[in-house]
Amino acid sequence: MPADDILLEAEDKMDKAVEHLKQQFRTVRTGRASAGLVEHLRVEYYGAPTELRQLATITVPDPLMIVIKPYDPGSVGDISKGIQASDLGITPIVEGKVIRLNIPPLSEDRRKQLGHQVKEMAEATKVSMRNVRRDAIKQIDADEKAKVLSEDEARKAHEDATELVHGHEKQIDEVLAHKTAEILEG
């Protein structure tokens, strides 16, 4: 396989890792209400676990409240139970066909915990990207040994793989800094 194809595949995997981290960060609670906090919650709906965003409209009328309006008013109880069973630590308030979630401000200790948690998530993503680089380098070395790549091409591909990782690690650091600031500002 040409070195360019190996590097493209590695870059694609790294891009997906960064996107996955961003998705994970959307579910981490900050001092503000966010639809991302609950949209991926799984709720038992007619015996099947279903994402909340498929069952209801989720709005954020103010920074400390999330309003959930189910498409099927009969699912209000199921959604309420699902929220209570989650690890959000927020008690839903059922008002007829609408569910309100009041987001309490975070304590200083909780902010520090969340900051540590997002740092661990970012580090895990960096490790997965280094594994992608390792796999790409193994492939490059195998191709060099099989005389598909010259020694110079292999060395250049090694450098490119390392540059790829460093570029993606910078992206992760930026996303982490933004999320940490969001958590601490609350």
Image (cartoon, grey):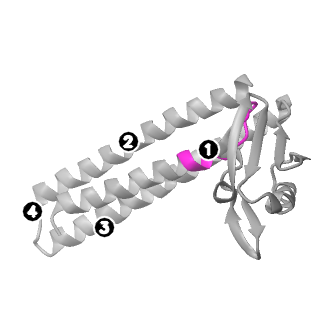
Instruction: Indicate whether 87 appears above or below 186.
Output: below
> Which residues make up the magenta segment?
22-33
Expressed as whole percent of the image width and height from the top left, the position of residue 175 reads 52, 36
In the picture, measured across the screen, residue 145 lies left or right of residue 109, that is: left
Which is more N-terminal, label 4 or label 3? 3
What amino acid does circle 2 point to?
Answer: His
Circle on res. 145: none
The reply to whether the C-beta atoms of the residues labelled 3 and 4 are less than 8 Å apart is: no
Residue topped by disc 3: 138
Q: Nearer the viewer, residue 105 or 45?
A: 45
Q: CA distance from mark 1 to mark 2?
A: 21 Å
Give SS at disc 1. Answer: helix
Q: Nearer the viewer, residue 47 or 40?
A: 47
Q: Residues within 10 Å of mark 3 (few under 14, many from 20)?
A: few
Residue topped by disc 4: 150
Mark 3 or mark 2, which is nearer to you? Answer: 2
In the picture, measured across the screen, residue 25 lies left or right of residue 116, that is: left
What amino acid does circle 1 point to?
Answer: Phe
Circle on res. 25: 1
Expressed as whole percent of the image width and height from the top left, the position of residue 35 reads 67, 42
| Quarter of the rendering occupied by the C terminus | top right
Asked whether residue 7 is drawn in magenta, I would say: no
In the picture, measured across the screen, residue 70 lies left or right of residue 19, that is: right
